[in-house]
């Protein structure tokens, strides 16, 4: 007996393949589209169709670009300082840094972090390409903007080793108290790092 | 300057139209589809395409059906007892009741609940059609399986008034302690209803 039409259960299954979407959430998405007569399904269809073949990676920075481009605007724009590179794990990390409006260098997307548990070794990341850029673009500073996690820290350490004694300043994002958080609610490790990195006024 | 390719931002916007999906979740869905080379985008596209014109409402029960059907299997199947109707607010409530495996009657989907705040009046719900079914199908019992909320209760009360003095038994789902919940964690209203509806052993 059909409790729900197959067209709907297929869509629920398809939504269920998205990360973090369980059966209830998938049902909610599908039923929303059935119930509300909007252009949302059409927009989703066209967005998904454009995805296939429409998106590529910049061959210098590995940022996401339209497949009709070769290099990201974040690299080619003359206002960007090619001698400063912020190294991030994933393409969306770069969006977060851009939103600060305080960074005017270029980026290098690693495509992940070293994580033996998930079977990700340093060879799978764009680390060799980063080292090559140091020589190609006469890079003066590498900002290791990886996550403040074990994987982020160990990837940063590995990159530092790979850069070796090249004449380039290596920095990383400051660790410390997030703005707006009370001292009493900060975890021990963050507080420890904030102490270590204390600055003179 | 393009931080993300337009094909990707379009898809992020499209995901953002789904209920409860904020910009971060939309980014996560889109990036997952970029990153993982699966058939998920194709399945979503075909599911969304089938949605348009592929889904209709049973003209008796208002359950969701394929548009090539006229009536839901839950109504036409000879094993279903047409003289018992469970009245639910939304099509997915019926799925929840079906999963119990304990109900063998048919359903009637109201298409919402009376809610003056949301501008939903009784005329927008399939209440007249329910009353018509009582005579058409010689209905013996109406189970008001609406939510245990203010809207659910007031809709149930309104339906009861509309049925009036027709010769049909009107019941509603029992209110009481959910299975597996400790008495001390039950809220006052639930506990009050559980007391009111206490049963002799």
Image (cartoon, coloured by chain):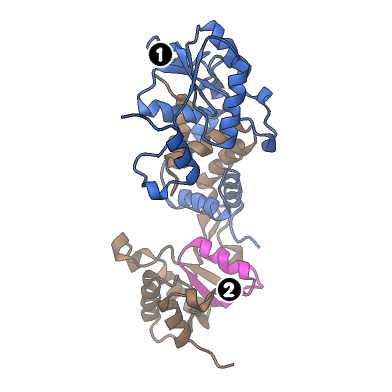
Chain colours: A blue, B brown
User: Number of numbered discs present?
Assistant: 2
The chain identifier of the residue carrying mark 1 reads: A
Residue B53 placed where, x, y %? 51, 47
Q: Which mark is residue B72?
A: none
Farthest residue, direction bottom: B200
Q: Which mark is residue A80?
A: 1
Q: Quadrant of the N terminus of chain B?
A: top left
Q: Quadrant of the C terminus of chain B?
A: bottom right
- Label 2 close to label 1 by CB (< 8 Å): no
Compute the Cα span from label 2 to label 1: 60 Å
The residue to which callout 2 is attached is: B180
User: Do discs 2 and 1 belong to a common subunit?
Assistant: no
Provide the residue span drawn in magenta: B75-102
Farthest residue, direction front: A200
Query: As rendered, which of B100 and A75 lies closer to the eye?
Result: A75
Residue A161 placed where, x, y %? 62, 19
Q: Is residue B175 magenta?
A: no
Task: Say whether residue A111 is visible.
Answer: no
Question: Where B56 sits versus B137, above or below?
Answer: above
Residue at x 67% of width, y 37% of height: A118
Query: As rendered, which of A132 and A196 lies closer to the eye?
Result: A196
The chain identifier of the residue carrying mark 2 reads: B
Disc 1 element: loop
Residue at x 52% of width, y 52% of height: A25
Question: Where A118 sits versus B72, above or below?
Answer: above
Residue at x 55% of width, y 37% of height: A149
Badge 1 crowding class, 10 Å Cα cut-off, few under 14, some 14 to 19, many 20 or more, is: some
Badge 2 crowding class, 10 Å Cα cut-off, few under 14, some 14 to 19, many 20 or more, is: few
Disc 2 element: loop
């Amino acid at each position: 007996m059909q409790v729900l039409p197959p067209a709907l259960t297929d869509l629920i299954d398809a939504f269920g393949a998205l990360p973090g979407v369980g059966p209830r959430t998938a049902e909610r998405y599908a039923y929303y589209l059935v119930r509300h007569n909007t252009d949302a399904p059409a927009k989703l269809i066209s967005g998904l169709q454009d995805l296939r073949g429409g998106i590529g990676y910049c061959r210098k920075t590995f940022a996401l670009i339209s497949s009709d481009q070769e290099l990201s605007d974040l690299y080619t724009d003359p206002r960007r300082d090619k001698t400063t590179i912020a190294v991030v794990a994933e393409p969306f990390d770069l969006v977060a840094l851009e939103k600060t409006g305080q960074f005017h260098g270029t980026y290098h997307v690693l495509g992940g972090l070293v994580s033996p548990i998930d079977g990700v070794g340093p060879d799978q990341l764009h680390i060799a390409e980063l080292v090559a850029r140091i020589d190609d673009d006469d890079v003066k500073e590498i900002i290791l903007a990886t996550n403040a996690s074990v994987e982020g820290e160990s990837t940063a350490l590995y990159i530092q080793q790979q850069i070796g004694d090249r004449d380039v300043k290596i920095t990383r994002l400051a660790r410390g108290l997030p703005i707006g958080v009370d001292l009493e609610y900060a975890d021990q490790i963050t507080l420890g790092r904030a102490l270590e990195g204390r600055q003179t006024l």
